[in-house]
Image: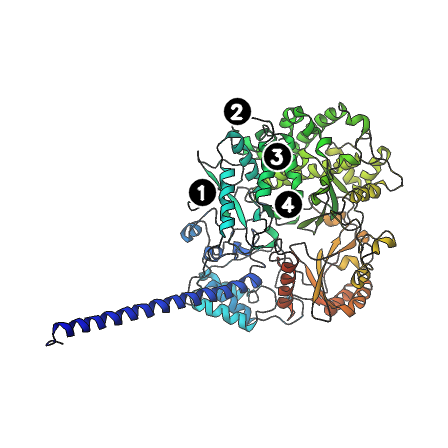
Amino acid sequence: MLNAGPIERWIFRLGIALAVFVFIGISKVSAQSSDAQSVEDWADVQSILDHRCVVCHSCYDAPCQLKLTSPDGLLRGGSKLAVYHTERLRDAPPTRLGVDAQTVPEWRALGFHSVTEPQQAGSVLERYLALGRKATLPEDQPLPEALDLKLDRKLVCPSADEFDSFEDSHPLAGMPYATAPLDPQEFQALQSWVNAGTPAFTSPVDIPDEIAAQVSAWEDFLNATDPRNQLTSRYLFEHLFLARLHFSGDDPRRFFQLVRSSTPSGVDIEVIATRRPLDDPGYELFYYRLQPVRETIVHKEHLVYTIGPDRMARYTELFLDAEWSVADLPPYGVADGGNPFSTFAAIPARSRYQFLLDDALFFVRSFIRGPVCHGETAVDVIEDRFWVSFLDPDADLSVTDPAFLRDGASVLELPVADVDHGTLGDLQGFSHHNKAKYLEFRDARYQASSAHETGFDYGAIWDGEGTNPNALITVFRHFDNASATTGFHGGIPETAWVIDFPIFERIYYNLVAGYDVFGRVEHQLATRLYMDELRMESEDLFLTFMPRNLRAGMHEEWYQGILAEIHTYWHQRRIDDSFPTGAHFETDAPKQEFLLALLDRGQGLWPTVDPINRCLNDSCLQGHGDATVTTLRNLANQPGPWVKFLPDLSLLLVEQSDGDAEIFTITHDKAHYNIAFLFHEAARRNPEADVLSIFPGLFASYPNFIFKVQQDQLNSFVDALKLIRTQSDWMSFVADYGVRRTSPDFWSDSDRIHALFTQQDPVQAGILDLNRYNDPKATDDPT
């Protein structure tokens, strides 16, 4: 081209430019194609992680704090420090994913080690997976003794440079832990992902314009600057900070979380991290924001709360249309903000109580799905199944008498406001002192009211105004966790609660808003002891609806034994037989008569009969002639020597001839002589009185075992179960109908149950937790 003319040189340069342009274009397309493939590969990997890893690695109780519900958790890695530590003498630094640190270096400074960084022998994650393939467990056999399933087992949590030693001393501890191995295709997908450097992608949340407009409207509503709006928004935040906010009519899998941010609407959210929602945010000016939830939905922490225009109108009606004013906004902090009755005294009690009643199930679930999501101590304060109703606002003096909470706020102090300044020995004294003073105050106010002349009748129980099913709730305890649902389910329970506004608000602040999962032993014990008092208040309030001459006897049935009598005396507990009842009874079973009468007021809000567990006469079978229901009735709500062998929570998968399947939840209702003490529950058990309660569908988070049976084998299943007398019988039954952790069908059955759960309730469903999945052994003690 040296002798070429101008035109030739121009054509040559144009050709070079075109070639470069084409090359760059091809490179961009190739890069885009590669990125798209990487994202697609990550989606496949994420699905495997969700259904094989997240089932154990989520929430605060994830082994080694390795929380795999999002790429951020994967990058954060693991820690040797446990969140749940009942003997901790000092508060631990909080380690909430997405809140207490934002970058990998910040997590390393908090003691977390990488599980994805490539090493010469492989990353920690890669080596765990390889170890799982190296030592495959025998199919359908009990686990080796070396594999411990106890929640409080000592965890090693090795970092990369410790893994050689860990593998030598724990050759069976590969992943997935103590289960059937991964499918070869799943393992290969994970291996390829690891070889590619474990790339992870946080997909942007696609928010439609209509939902984005509602988000903006809600942030405007919550950040209004009028003092009444500010106090209302603070009240809402302290009660909804755990909620998965779901816009009515939106995609059933899209949720938001209410947070406090240092940045206003229209700017990226910068979450303000405080230990509790009632703590000072530390900013003179901050903003309430709705943050999209990007994590995998895990059922045990999935607290759905529906919002939309109707909800905003309801808040306006309850809080802003009411007559009240606020001169100075109350301070923050545990000492000042730990008592909601003084902090929010300006807001009418009726507004606050009705706000709780409107979504009572959400708040009851927050007690048991919130931070207290691990350990027997959190729920051993309650019976295995009981029914809850609520005192009607018009019957509650804390609502109808403005002076009640104004004068009683000082004796409604919660331990969260005192424990930081106390000692371990002060806790019991605090609990007793405050309860005695409050009950003395409460009794005096009610004795001076017109209610003491007439007593409480059925109208004193909130009926949901004929539209709200939250008026009646069943709570189930499954040893170290619990669940709740609307309506009264199962047979007539041993105990029942009636909750008024002071009880409701104190349970919430004791177990949720005021609870610090990272707190030391004093805080943990204070929470447990105070909840003991609140349970007793709820039971005693129920007893005021019973005939006066029967109350003491009913209480004695609930608290049997000399130690329980001492407990009653020590707690200064007195069964009030002076308060009359306004309810009239026609049978010699007033508890049953009263509770069933509450059901009859529902006008279709909940079923009035339970054809499996509570069929008091043949009329309850009308409309429930399904053969499965009829067969399962032969197991439900009846004691027998076989009952004690069942775990706390089982799932029964009934397979139909056409390939479909139906799920039933089987709860083991364990009987107790009393639940008056913190320790040695086994010494207070009465296993001969245990029964099973069986329910269509799925509502609990932690299945202990899965049974699988063909529809035409259901009668044989029931007959075989009722013949169990020994542990050997039980092991034979498990071999015939159980799905062991080592079963080749373990993962496929788990996937099937998750799919059926999502189909049953796409908004409420989430990944179930398999940390508590049992492994029956011939040496187990069924009691």
Q: Residue at x 69, y 70 (%)?
A: 659
- Tag in front: 1 or 2: 1
Kind of element beneath mark 3: helix
Query: Which amino acid does the dot numbered 4 rest on?
Result: Phe
- Give the x, y percent position of residue 749: 65, 66
Kind of element beneath mark 1: loop
Kind of element beneath mark 2: loop
Query: Which amino acid does the dot numbered 1 rest on?
Result: Ser
Category of crowding for the residue at label 2, using alpha-carbon neighbours closer than 10 angstroms: few (below 14), some (14–19), many (at least 20): few
The dot on residue 761 is none
Residue placed under numbered mark 1 in the picture: 265
Query: Which amino acid does the dot numbered 3 rest on?
Result: Leu
In the image, 141 versus 203, the foreground residue is 203
The dot on residue 318 is 3
Location of residue 739 (image quadrant): bottom right
Q: Residue at x 26, y 70 (%)?
A: 20
Q: How many marks?
A: 4
Query: Which amino acid does the dot numbered 2 rest on?
Result: Ala
Residue placed under numbered mark 4 in the picture: 362
Image marks 1 and 4: residues in contact by CB distance under 8 Å: no
Residue placed under numbered mark 2 in the picture: 327
In the image, 102 versus 606, the foreground residue is 606
- Tag in front: 2 or 3: 3
Image marks 3 and 1: residues in contact by CB distance under 8 Å: no
Q: Looking at the picture, does residue 80 appear above or below residue 736? A: above
Mark earlier in primary sequence (1, 4): 1
Q: Quadrant of the C terminus?
A: bottom right
> In whole angstroms, how far apart are the C-alphas of marks 1 and 2?
27 Å
- Give the x, y percent position of residue 707: 71, 64
Mark earlier in primary sequence (2, 3): 3
